[in-house]
Image: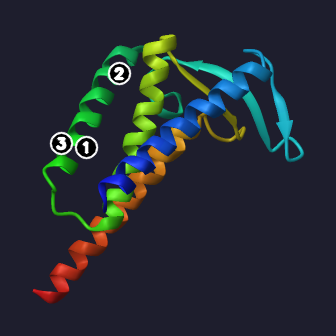
């Protein structure tokens, strides 16, 4: 994957995450909510001091530190040209962009701003979606690669 594409994806994710958070925070007060799609989705701003989807609430500092470590490791892997298929780099770019988006919140606000409430799932944001999708893409690519290598060898 080209340098421009890798960093472009990460930057697009982080920027989209921050833009949606700024938009929601400007239009929906903390504690308020807007119902969408016949109330199946609610835009409901919340403060998340833990990890993705509200886990580990009392470990915000640790999660912030691990986020920085993850960003550095992904950056280093890309700079060292780690041998991964192109789609794996897409997954890692999504993870990196999401991690940066949530890290900006932790530094700027002291918590992560979550706002998408599906009622059956903990409240989340665009960065959480990117991180989750990125990990799923990475995992799928690596599983397929491993199976192909076993079949060939």
Q: Quadrant of residue 139?
A: bottom left
Observer-nearest residue: 62 or 121?
Answer: 62
The answer to whether residue 123 shows anywhere in this view is no
Crowdedness near tag 1: few (<14), some (14–19) or many (≥20) residues, C-alpha within 10 Å: some
Observer-nearest residue: 60 or 121?
Answer: 60
Q: Quadrant of residue 81?
A: bottom left
Left/right placement of residue 130 relative to residue 115 reads: left
Compared to residue 95, the image places residue 35 above or below, namely above
The answer to whether residue 76 shows anywhere in this view is yes
Image colouring: rainbow
Q: CA distance from mark 2 to mark 1?
A: 15 Å
Q: CA distance from mark 3 to mark 1?
A: 5 Å
Label at residue 76: 3
Q: Quadrant of the C terminus?
A: bottom left
Left/right placement of residue 151 relative to residue 53 reads: left
Q: Can you identify the residue that label 1 sits on? A: 74
What is the secondary structure assignment of the residue under circle 2? helix
Residue 149 percent coordinates (x, y): 17, 80
Callouts 3 and 1 close, C-beta under 8 Å: yes
Q: Quadrant of the N terminus?
A: bottom left
Residue 49 percent coordinates (x, y): 49, 17
Q: Can you identify the residue that label 2 sits on? A: 64
């Amino acid at each position: 994957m080209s340098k421009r594409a890798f960093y472009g994806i990460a930057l697009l994710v982080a920027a989209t995450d921050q833009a949606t958070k700024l938009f929601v925070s400007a239009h929906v007060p903390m504690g308020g909510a807007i119902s969408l799609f016949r109330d199946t989705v609610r835009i409901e701003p919340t403060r998340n001091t833990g990890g993705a989807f509200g886990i580990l609430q009392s470990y915000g500092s640790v999660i912030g530190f691990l986020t920085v470590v993850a960003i550095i490791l992904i950056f280093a892997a890309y700079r060292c040209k780690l041998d991964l298929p192109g789609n794996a780099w897409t997954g890692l770019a999504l993870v990196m962009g999401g991690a940066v988006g949530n890290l900006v919140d932790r530094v700027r606000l002291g918590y992560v701003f979550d706002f998408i409430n599906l009622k059956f799932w903990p409240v989340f944001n665009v960065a959480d979606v990117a991180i989750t999708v990125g990990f799923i893409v990475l995992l799928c690519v690596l599983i397929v690669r491993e199976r192909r290598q076993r079949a060939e060898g």
